[in-house]
Image (cartoon, grey):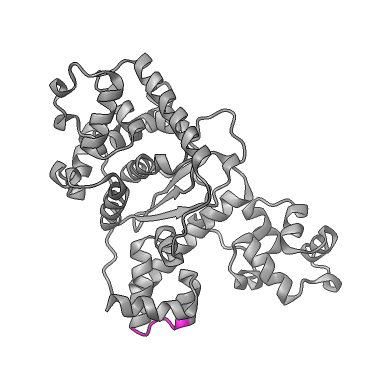
Amino acid sequence: MLTWAREQIGYSLEQAAEAIGISANLLAAAESKDDEHRLTLAQLRKAAEAYGTPFGYFYLSEAPHDDKYLPVPDYRMDPNLIGVDHPRLHLEIKKIRSRREIFIDIVQNLGHELPSFRQINGQSASETAKLARNRLGVTQELVGDLSFGQAYSFWKSRIENDGALVYESQYIPKASGVIGAALSYDLFPVILVGRGAEINVRKLFTLLHEYAHLLVGESALNDARAQMVRDHNSAPLRLEAFCNQVAAEILVPPSDIRIADYHGLDPVESMERLAHTFKVTYTTAAVCLQRMGIIDDRELAGLLQLRRDVHKAKAKKTQGDTRIPRENIMRLDLGRPMFDAVLTAYSDGLLDVFDASTILNLRVKKIDKLVSATQ
């Protein structure tokens, strides 16, 4: 079980030993069932934490084999990227799978209905986008009343209401290039969205791109380049192009655009108008303008370079981090459905305060405060 857990996360013997805080020789001896060199309970707990594996698994007679451990298909497109087998990435994937199982267990114990997630198959990208937007109950009137700061939370809430779990992580290794992932299940499929200064500007489109993967029942790991794919000369490219078009048309329905409104505007003015109308980022607006023929490929390239320059300039001016209450961070990490379900289960007596504290990764004294604030 020690060997299985280490290999599941992708650690070499030396990497694992360093993470646990023991020598590689001791770990090798423990894995070889050397009775004279067993790990202590404290070392086993460190191993469980490092491997993202439940402590009790070390006492199983054989490794569990089910779809929880199947690898997520890699749809990253940047040829310069490495690290898809990075242990930290494996740990994040294991973490969100574990969270999903915990959430389902809590919801079942609360006696709530477990709705199946409905896929949309056999439709064109445009038809899929139209059906999805209607299913989410989104109208241009609702979007028009939003501020830029509200847009991501608005779409995330709608997708969660549709039966998907949305988790965020600031720990996805940069070397992997992964900015989002989709894990398709019939019951509560999962979207993972990266969080951080360099990828926050892509969060909204990433969210909708991964949602498009769930709509067609295809799990995936995606990078930034995958979200720019428009070619169709291979199966992966066709899928990414399809998901990109679905995401773009959910956010910016072509039928809601009056081309005449953009006549006489230069590319920057067109980008700004579209972004403000549909509350999307300037980059997403630029791509949508190109898709509709309002700007050409050369103008799109110029707008994208302009946005890269702007982001670099902003990054240089940014000093320090804005302090965010930990409970707000955990709401982002765990998603509203899971966060609320844990508090409800604690309030109903199904979880004790220590279980709720562990799941939400918050101090015990904070749990009662949060429950009181919701009553």
Quarter of the image holding residue 124?
top left
Task: For residue 4, say whether it is visible.
Answer: yes
Q: x, y (%) of residue 285?
A: 30, 30
| Quadrant of the snapshot with the C terminus | bottom left
What secondary structure characterizes most of the magenta part? loop
Work out whether residue 302 or residue 11 is closer to the camera in this orientation and state it.
302
Going by the image, does 292 lie left or right of 219?
Answer: left
Q: Residue at x 42, y 78 (%)?
A: 367
First to last magenta residue range: 348-353
Q: Residue at x 72, y 76 (%)?
A: 41
Q: Is residue 120 above or below residue 339?
A: above
Work out whether residue 55 or residue 134 is closer to the camera in this orientation and state it.
134
Q: x, y (%) of residue 262?
A: 19, 22
Q: Is residue 161 above or below residue 256?
A: below
**Residue 10 highlighted magenta (yes or no):** no
Quarter of the image holding residue 104?
bottom left
Q: Residue at x 44, y 68 (%)?
A: 102
Q: x, y (%) of residue 131?
A: 19, 41
